[in-house]
Amino acid sequence: MGNYNIAVVAGDGIGPEVTKEAMSVLTAIGEKWGHTFTFNEVLAGGCAIDAYGECLPESTLDACKAADAVMLGAVGGPKWDNVANAQRPEKALLGLRKELDLFSNLRPAKIYDALADACPLKAEIVEGGLDILIVRELTGGIYFGERGYREGKYGNEAYDVETYSEMEISRILKNAFEVAMQRGKKLCCVDKANVLESSRLWRKVAEEMKSDYPEVELSYMYIDNAAMQMVRNPKQFDVIVTSNMFGDILSDEASMITGSIGLLPSASLNGTNKGMYEPIHGSAPDIAGQNKANPVAAILSVAMMLQYTFHLSAEAEAIENAVTAVLEAGYRTGDIYSEGMIAVGTKEMGAEILARI
Ligand code: IPM
Ligand code: MG
């Protein structure tokens, strides 16, 4: 039994609707297992620009730093597309990642049996299911490297630099090796080592570390080939570890092949397993406030929170089982609806999951 303080950054668009369902599920878990989850709701993203004139107010950052874990809905929307770069809602996300030192981003891509038809690939390619975990470096590389404008040979030019230190590489690889140990014991390091110096450093560090994990089968793949293999034969992958930008791209591709972007959670962890948990889908402003969004990704994100930050595996599993049961019972939000299924909205989907906790 424990007391857990969670900062909730519901954000924009469908963020508030889906995080509300996730909070209800956590509360139900607390009632059943005798834990107390306390929620501190704070603003970031577009809604914070509207309320405070900045996308990541100091008070929000402080609340997130003080919390045991952070739950995030989604940020951004067309309303704020024209605000200055430094205050774009996406900056709130990058700021939270950097300030909380959340360098390790776990993005699972899994096909649910009940939703196998939603996969856009031919059935034989994904036969027997698909369960990939992408470990994306989240606070380094080109996202946070030196950038700017300068006078070049042809006049004004812009640049963004990819930099990785051995420290940054070894800490993300350590996480990746460790999660691989808990899964299928296969780790594929995706890079562009035929061109990039920084990729060659990733390989050097991985080679130095691999003897610490003799059970893990380590391989390397260039990013272009990996993007191709992801649709040609995705079942070859267990855990993929990669840089910030390659992970950004590859994780969207992996989520698409599950056919159910509304179902996928993610965790962003620091070195002590404090984390920020968020659905991988965006703010979907077109359906916001209409009880149409799928709350499953947000609900599965709190299952990841229970597992990775609070080490409450039984409770996490209870959520995952409830979600599987609801999908098997045929309940579907619009994004995953197919004929003959039971169409429900955000609240009803949340209630069905809650009823099975
Ligand atoms: C993601 C998103 C973000 C990223 C954007 C919104 C800054 O695409 O979490 O994958 O590029 O990291
Ligand atoms: Mg992305």
Image (cartoon, helix red, strand yellow):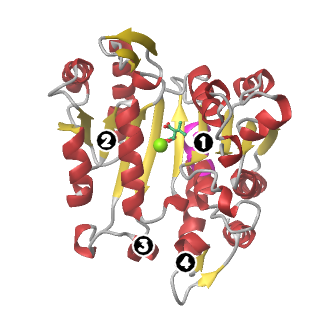
Q: Is mark 4 within 8 Å of ligand 2?
A: no
Q: Earlier in the sequence, mark 2 or mark 3?
A: 3
Q: Secondary structure at mark 1?
A: strand
Q: Nearer the viewer, residue 133 or 289?
A: 289
- For residue 240, the mark is 2
Q: Which residues are magenta?
A: 302-311
Q: CA distance from mark 4 to mark 3?
A: 9 Å
Q: CA distance from mark 1 to mark 3?
A: 25 Å
On the image, the x and y values in percent for residue 153 come to: 29, 11
- For residue 118, the mark is 3
Q: Earlier in the sequence, mark 2 or mark 1?
A: 2
- Which residue is tagged 1? 277
Q: CA distance from mark 1 to mark 4?
A: 25 Å
Mark 3 burial class by Cα count in 10 Å: few <14, some 14-19, many 20+: some
Q: CA distance from mark 2 to mark 1?
A: 19 Å
Whether 239 is drawn above or below 162: the answer is below
Q: CA distance from mark 4 to mark 2?
A: 30 Å
Amino acid type at image mark 3: Ala
On the image, the x and y values in percent for residue 60 come to: 77, 28
Q: Secondary structure at mark 2?
A: strand
Whether 107 is drawn above or below 147: the answer is below
